[in-house]
Image (tube, rainbow, N blue to C red):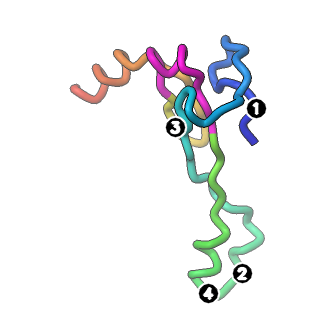
Amino acid sequence: MVSKCANPRCSAVFRYLQRGKLFGHEVPSPKSDETASNSEFRMSSRKIEFFWLCDDCASTMTLIFRKGEISVEPIKKVRAAAAD
């Protein structure tokens, strides 16, 4: 459950969906379903974790998901990397 801004330097508390920006990221399911023979069952057991940036942080930052790690990065840096 989302309780505060994903920016570790921010202490804003999550209260309303209308404020800030919500991010959903699919995380690997537990290994326990590898024995299931039905691929639909394996797909349905995937989990989505949600992260939230408050209005102030979302105006200048975004979340980046890399190799199971989540980081908060300035939007300008992300746009520059995408242009390369």
Label 1, label 4: how many angstroms apart (C-alpha)? 35 Å
1 or 4: tag closer to the N-terminus: 1
**Residue 72: percent from left, percent from top:** 54, 22
Q: Residue furthest bottom?
A: 37
Q: Nearer the viewer, mark 2 or mark 4?
A: 4
Q: Which mark is residue 66?
A: 3
4 or 3: tag closer to the N-terminus: 4
- Asked if residue 29 is among those painted magenta in the image, a careful observer would answer no
Q: Residue at x 61, y 87 (%)?
A: 38
Judged left or right of residue 17, residue 33 is right
- What residue would you read off at disc 2? 35
Label 4, label 3: how many angstroms apart (C-alpha)? 29 Å
Kindly state the secondary structure of the residue where label 2 is placed.
helix
Label 2, label 4: how many angstroms apart (C-alpha)? 9 Å
Q: Quadrant of residue 28?
A: bottom right
Q: Which mark is residue 38?
A: 4
Query: How busy is the neighbourhood of tag 4: few (under 14 within 10 Å), some, or many (20 plus)?
Result: few
**Residue 2: percent from left, percent from top:** 72, 37
Judged left or right of residue 26, residue 14 is right
Q: Nearer the viewer, mark 3 or mark 1?
A: 1
3 or 2: tag closer to the N-terminus: 2
Q: Residue at x 64, y 80 (%)?
A: 41
Tell me the kind of residue under disc 3: Arg
> Vertical placement of 31 versus 36: above or below?
above
Tell me the kind of residue under disc 2: Thr
- What residue would you read off at disc 1? 3
Tell me the kind of residue under disc 4: Asn
> Vertical placement of 20 versus 35: above or below?
above
Query: Which stretch appears magenta?
Result: 51-62
> Vertical placement of 26 versus 3: above or below?
below
